[in-house]
Every structure is written in C-alpha cells, then in structure tokens.
Image: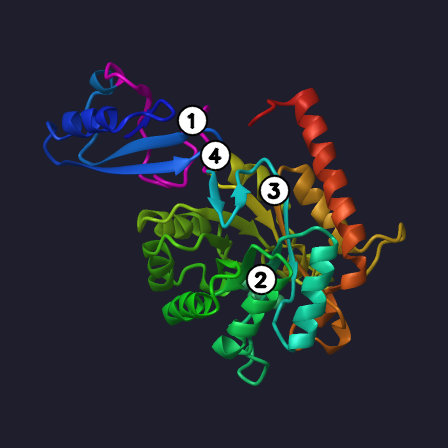
C-alpha cells in the first residue's frame, strides 16, 4: 500500500502515517521523498501483510492525498492508477521529469582524447549539456576493444567540465566501476556528473543492479534486456528501486531477432506508451543500438532519425545517440554513429518532433501527463 501525502507535507504528518501503520502486525514502512519542480512529494510505503489493512484510517489522516493498494509487481517503479506522479528528479542541475527533452549524444566508446574534445566542443556549440561516453565496454568478442577503463576518466571528466557538460551516461558492468567513477570525479573536483548506465547485457545481473540501487549519488539509465520480455526487464529495473535508488530513466533499445533485419535490432518503440503507463519512470530511446547503421531513406533522412521520430512522437523524453567526429575510425560501433557535423540538424529534428508530440497531446490528450 502506498500513502501519498500532500506536497510539502511536514514531518509530523509523515510520522502520523508511520505511527498508524505500526499498529498493524507484520507491516513495516519505508518513506520515500522526491523533489518535484515546485514541491517535495513524500510517500509512505507499507510493506508486508497489508492485505487486511484498511485504507480508510489512512485516508482520514491529515495531509494524506491518496492511498493506493499496489500489486507486488513494480511496487516502486509502477504507476499505480491514474494521478500517480511521474518520478521526477534533478541531478547536477538537470531535471528529469518526462516533460522536457534531453539528448545524450556522444561516443559509444571513448577512444582518443582528441575525439572526446571534438565531440564535446560540438555538443557545447549545439547547446547540449548531456552526453554518453562508453569507458567500460561489454563486447561480444573478447578480442574486440574493451574500452579504456578508469585510465581515461580524469581527462574525460576534465573535458566535460571545460565544455559545460553536466551529465555523462556511462555504462558500468561491475560494482567496482561505480567506485572508480566516484573517485575520479572527486579527484578532478567534480567538474561534471555521471548517470550510471545498465546495458542490455546486464539487465538481469541482479548483483550489479543491487549495487547501483544501494547508492543514491548517481542516477541510473536502465536499458531493457534484448532477449527478454518487457515484464522481465521492468521487474529487473524494480531491483534498483527496491534497494533505495528510484532515480531511474528506462531506455528502450530494440530487441534481438532477425525479423528486424536489416536493422541491428527490432525497434521496440511501440512500448514507449506501455512503459509510461505501467511505470512512473521517464522513458529514453536509443536509436543507435536499435538500428545499428547509418542508411538513409529516399527522403534523405537516416533510419536513425525516423525511429527517433517514432519514439518521441510516442512520448519518450530522452534520446541516447552515438555521434563521432570520425565514425570510420571509431573503435566501437562506428557504422551507427552520426557525424558530429550533423548534430545541429539532429537536435532541430528531435525538438521539432517533441514539439509536435506536445501539440498532439494538447489537442487530443491530457496535457501535463
Ligand atoms: C551502449 O549503449 O553502449 C550499449 C552497449 O548498448 P546496449 O547495452 O543497449 O547494447
Ligand atoms: Mn555501442
């Protein structure tokens, strides 16, 4: 059962809910607060034998806005009925609320300092403060480039700070990577921030998920598993929240099947509204790993643009996209990288589609949802 309090509820009202819950045997509580744009939202979650706990006494308490019985599934990330707030959070000055668009454009894998510098300069020029930089690369073959690892973190963070980058999406494949990132950020004076990315190969690496969930310093970009159902991916995502960190963006990146050929994966952006309905998380799309190539349609637009359009028109609010100053030299996924010179065009395109989505919702939907 989730008891949501009125915005900015005082501590005494939260305590009132917790005290009432303590009267029911076998029930424990956990309090969650998250900062909305204008107010602090608090929720008290009743855990354990809640089936026999009535809702009315809680509804009658001062400051209680809503009491909802939740199924066990997606207890924390789930959107339990209409009116549930999207889980909003702010990290390093960037707000993730499902209402504003974020473009995380950058290198699939950090290769040279010069390429990082050129990429970040292009981002700064395009007015973008968010990027992706792969440092720990999970590769299909052990003989492929595995990423530069912690050695490159100092100069990646330094360059990010220089170019005004506030958040870097960075995949971690092992708990010790979180410590390496934390230490490197501290040593370099915190010039930027990091969003920990869980890649599709680790969607069900439950021990790693527990580690990213146990720390609250870094938010999490959680990718769906490429060969499992959406339900399994969402259950895995719940692991992160259940350990204490609900600052999560859920990312669709396509699913593995040859039925999507010639694309690398079958684009699954029909699931954008499903994830938005079933969970309260902002939704990201990754067109680069979904499409996997830079082919263009007869209208001149790359397939990657077209699928970004599909995801944004369906309500996604974040795009993770590979760009590179010299795609032909990239050590990982060069064929799917957009040239940095095309970034301004891409940004304009994405903003146009997002604007069209907002117009459509204003006319046909429920604004503010
Ligand atoms: C990536 O974003 O670099 C990546 C490896 O993606 P995925 O986990 O979706 O394959
Ligand atoms: Mn890649």
Q: Nearer the viewer, residue 88 or 197?
A: 88
Mark with earlier residue (4, 3): 4
Q: CA distance from mark 4 to mark 2?
A: 30 Å
- Of labels 3 and 2, earlier in sequence is 2
Q: Residues within 10 Å of mark 2 (few under 14, many from 20)?
A: many
Nearer the N terminus, badge 4 or badge 1? Answer: 1
Q: Nearer the viewer, mark 1 or mark 2?
A: 2
Q: Nearer the viewer, residue 104 or 70?
A: 104
Residue 16 position, x and y percent, is 19, 24
Q: In front: 67, or 36?
A: 36
**Main SS of the magenta segment?**
loop
- Residue lying farthest bottom? 143
Magenta extent: 59-87
**Quadrant assignment for the N terminus:** top left
Number of numbered callouts drawn: 4
Distance between mark 3 and mark 1 Cα atoms = 21 Å
* Callout 3 touching callout 2 (CB < 8 Å): no
Check whether the beta carbons of the residues at disc 4 and disc 1 lie within 8 A of each other. no
């Amino acid at each position: 059962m989730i008891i949501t309090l009125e915005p900015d509820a005082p501590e005494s009202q939260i305590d009132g809910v917790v005290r009432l819950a303590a009267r029911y045997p076998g029930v424990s509580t956990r309090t969650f607060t998250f900062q909305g744009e204008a107010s602090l939202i608090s929720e008290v979650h009743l855990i354990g034998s809640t089936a026999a706990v009535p809702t009315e006494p809680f509804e009658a308490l001062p400051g209680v806005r809503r009491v909802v019985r939740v199924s066990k599934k997606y207890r924390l990330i789930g959107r339990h009925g209409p009116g549930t707030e999207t889980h909003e959070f702010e990290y390093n000055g960037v707000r993730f609320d499902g209402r504003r668009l974020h473009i995380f454009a950058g290198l699939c894998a950090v290769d040279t300092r010069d390429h990082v510098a050129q990429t970040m300069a292009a981002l700064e020029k395009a007015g973008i403060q968010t990027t992706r930089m792969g440092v720990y690369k999970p590769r299909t073959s052990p003989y492929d480039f595995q990423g530069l690892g912690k050695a490159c973190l100092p100069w990646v963070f330094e360059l990010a700070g220089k170019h005004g980058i506030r958040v870097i999406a960075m995949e971690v494949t092992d708990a010790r990577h979180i410590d390496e990132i934390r230490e490197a950020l501290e040593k370099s004076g915190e010039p930027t921030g990091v969003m920990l990315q869980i890649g599709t190969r680790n969607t069900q690496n439950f021990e790693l998920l527990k580690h990213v969930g146990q720390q609250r310093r870094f938010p999490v970009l959680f990718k769906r598993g490429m060969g499992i159902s959406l339900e399994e991916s969402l259950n895995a995502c719940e692991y992160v929240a259940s350990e204490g960190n609900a600052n999560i963006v859920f990312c669709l990146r396509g699913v593995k099947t040859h039925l999507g050929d010639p694309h690398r994966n079958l684009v699954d952006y029909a699931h954008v509204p499903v994830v938005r309905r079933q969970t309260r998380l902002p939704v990201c799309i990754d067109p680069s790993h979904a499409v996997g190539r830079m082919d263009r349609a007869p209208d001149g637009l790359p397939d990657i643009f077209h699928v970004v359009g599909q995801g944004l028109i369906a309500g996604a609010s974040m795009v993770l996209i590979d760009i590179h100053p010299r795609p032909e030299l990239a050590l990982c996924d060069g064929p799917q990288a957009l040239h940095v010179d095309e970034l301004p065009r891409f940004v304009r395109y994405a903003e146009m589609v997002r604007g069209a989505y907002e117009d459509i919702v204003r006319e046909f939907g429920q604004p503010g949802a």
